Image (cartoon, rainbow, N blue to C red):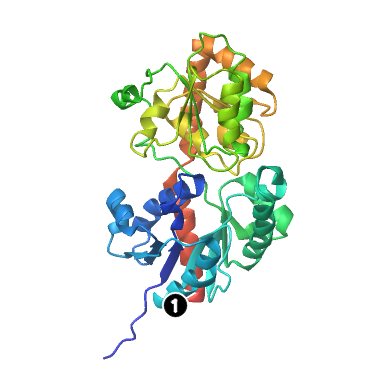
Amino acid sequence: MNRAVTRRPVLGVDFHVWDGIFQGSRSHLLGLYRAAIPLAPEIDFVFFLDQPEALRRAHVEFAASHVRLVRMPHRPGPWRLAWQLPWLRWRHGVDLLHMQYRLPLLPAGACACTIHDVLYETHPQFFTRFFVWQSRLTGRQAARAAQLLFTVSAYSRDQIVRLYGVDRERVAITCNGVDFERFAPGAAGAAAVTALGLTPGGYLLTLGRLEPRKNHLTLLRAYAQLASDAPPLVIVGQRDFHYGAVFDEIKRLQLDARVRVLETVDDATLPAVLRHALLFVYPAYAEGFGMPVAEAMASGVPVITSNTTALPEVAGPGALLVDPSSPEQLAQAMARLLVDADGRRRLVQVGLQHVRQFDWQASAATFVAALRRHFQHEGP
């Protein structure tokens, strides 16, 4: 007796962020799919990126039997959206294509989209005019046209609903998570920190791309108000845009001997640099989530961060919150924790408890459940 063969659903993923600078969207896709792939053996995953072998070597989940890594040579965004992805979608029989922030110019089928934030709408001053114009156009279209819509925080969901008029029920939250094996308290990695010329437990740390929204200038101005014997400040981040102002401010404030900028800390060393910081300071003006805050809390480091956008949601009671526009308030918070060892310990304990909710397994379960509902309803 002949039986009809049911074709397996195929999920395609624009994974080009793997090839770029370290940023939240890159970490999100890695964390989400490392957890989602084992949860959904009935779905074929096809990832499109320029360096497939590097991904396969770095993360064993992407070598699973129901995963294909397809080379998509690096090209400018318009070329990728107009030609590469539609062609690859057709070539590899993709039933649902998962994008971030925007959709292909010719979707040619169902799409899922993760819109991490709409800060280009609410905080346009921190982006180029072209980026704001382009993102407003493509973000609105993606929010309304995607069959599945995801975001990473309640704050971002509320802004998407308010600005784009989509139903609240349509927006599923797949929070950024923390890899608790990588980001954890302890003594591991002290030698790697020393090799960078740092003293374990003897520096203040911030982490984020060198661009205006991360607010390095306010941090530098606050740090300059601390006593001259304050621990050195370490800035970990790759150059993005308008980064020159950071180096100019270091010189203007005569902090060259007290501030280190590390632009090339690799994935293996970063957790050690984080867990051995005395304080983690993250005064970003605006975030759709703020992964460094969660990773610092998971590493057992006391955190100071901003009282704006999604950062209070992520930090909860596990951090001191300050006005990111006030160098004086930030300096006072740093000075307070530098002399208050008990206060640092309290923040660490509360932070370690609070951060457990940001779990990749939980976000992947939400994500996979949405995929299954879609494929059951629409079919492959």
Q: Residue at x 54, y 18 (%)?
A: 255
124 vs 314, nearest the viewer: 124
Q: Residue at x 51, y 69 (%)?
A: 374
300 vs 191, nearest the viewer: 191
- At label 1, counting other C-alpha atoms closer than 10 Å, the crowd grade (few under 14, some 14-19, many 20 or more) is few
Q: Looking at the picture, does residue 318 appear above or below residue 360? A: above
Q: Residue furthest bottom?
A: 1
Residue 135 position in % (x across, y down): 65, 57
Name the quadrant of the C terminus.
bottom left
Judge whether residue 316 can be spotted in this image.
no
Q: What residue sits right under mark 1 in the picture?
A: 90
The image quarter in which residue 13 lies: bottom left
Q: Is 311 on the left-hand or right-hand side of 371?
A: right
Residue 50 position in % (x across, y down): 38, 60
Q: Amino acid at mark 1?
A: Trp
Residue 11 position in % (x across, y down): 43, 67
Q: Looking at the picture, does residue 285 appear above or below residue 75? A: above
SS class, disc 1: helix
Judge whether residue 40 can be spotted in this image.
yes
How many marks on residues? 1
Q: Is 97 on the left-hand or right-hand side of 211?
A: left
Q: Is 330 on the left-hand or right-hand side of 303?
A: right
Name the quadrant of the N terminus.
bottom left
